Image (cartoon, helix red, strand yellow):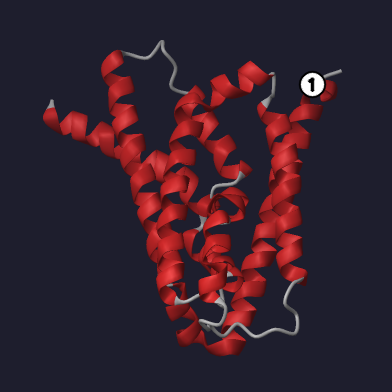
Amino acid sequence: MGNGLAEGFGSLFLLIFAAAFPIVNPAGSALIFLDMTRHAAHRTREGLARRVAFYSFLVLNVSLFIGSYVLEFFGISVPALRVAGGIVVAAAGWKFLQEHEAEGVEEGSRGDAASADDYAGMAFYPFTMPITTGPGTISVMIALGTSHTSHDPLQYRIEFGMAALLANAVLALLVYLCFAHADRVRRLLGNTGTTIALRLAAFILFCIGVQILWSGVAEMLAPWKLH
């Protein structure tokens, strides 16, 4: 019985983690985070990474457990969320592709004291949303949450909730580690390698936004295909 419970818990953990990890993409998001905080000191970046990880944990859990109720209260469908979110994510990816064409990515503490509050104000937007846990992640979490309804046995729902909390905590920890130590990637890759990686991460973010947008449009048009 205990083995069955542990196996079920492990399966749920892997289901939630595997569904969210590719979209959260801690390593790719960390490169964009590095680009946007390239003039910040390591201490400032580490504190900001802690905030982003905490906010990401909150967004993941709120989306999973009560996201469907929030959408229902405001009369927003999941396809509409995906269309709007896809536009936001694609626009952010396009913006990052175009920015800093002539700038380096070297770190410096210049202006860090004056801009520390500004960085803190960016912890939720745009670092948490839409870069780390954006509309794609939210829609996946909502879909996972609605697939486990009140009709499921109480023990199963408790098991699902505990597995979800652990999976989201691991994701948040990975976000913190990748963001807090993103400057080590720059030192490892060098300026040219980091610039290439940043452009690739921004392009992937743009593609994710287009995919989310396309999925939402396809869901909206699905009823008309039947006629």
Residue picked out by circle 1: 223
Residue 50, position in %: x, y?
40, 57
Please report the residue visible at 34 percent of the width from the left and 29 percent of the height from the top: 161
Q: Nearer the viewer, residue 73 or 146?
A: 73
Direction from residue 96 to residue 171 in the image, left or right: left
Direction from residue 157 to residue 141 in the image, left or right: right
Please report the residue visible at 62 percent of the width from the left and 17 percent of the height from the top: 73
Please report the residue visible at 69 percent of the width from the left and 42 percent of the height from the top: 85
Q: Tell me if residue 51 comes above or below residue 204 in the rendering.
A: above
Residue 137, position in %: x, y?
55, 43
Direction from residue 65 to residue 122 in the image, left or right: right
Screen quadrant of the N terminus:
top left
Screen quadrant of the C terminus:
top right
- Evaluate whether residue 215 shows in this view: no
Please report the residue visible at 73 percent of the width from the left and 31 percent of the height from the top: 80
Q: Tell me if residue 71 comes above or below residue 19 in the rendering.
A: above
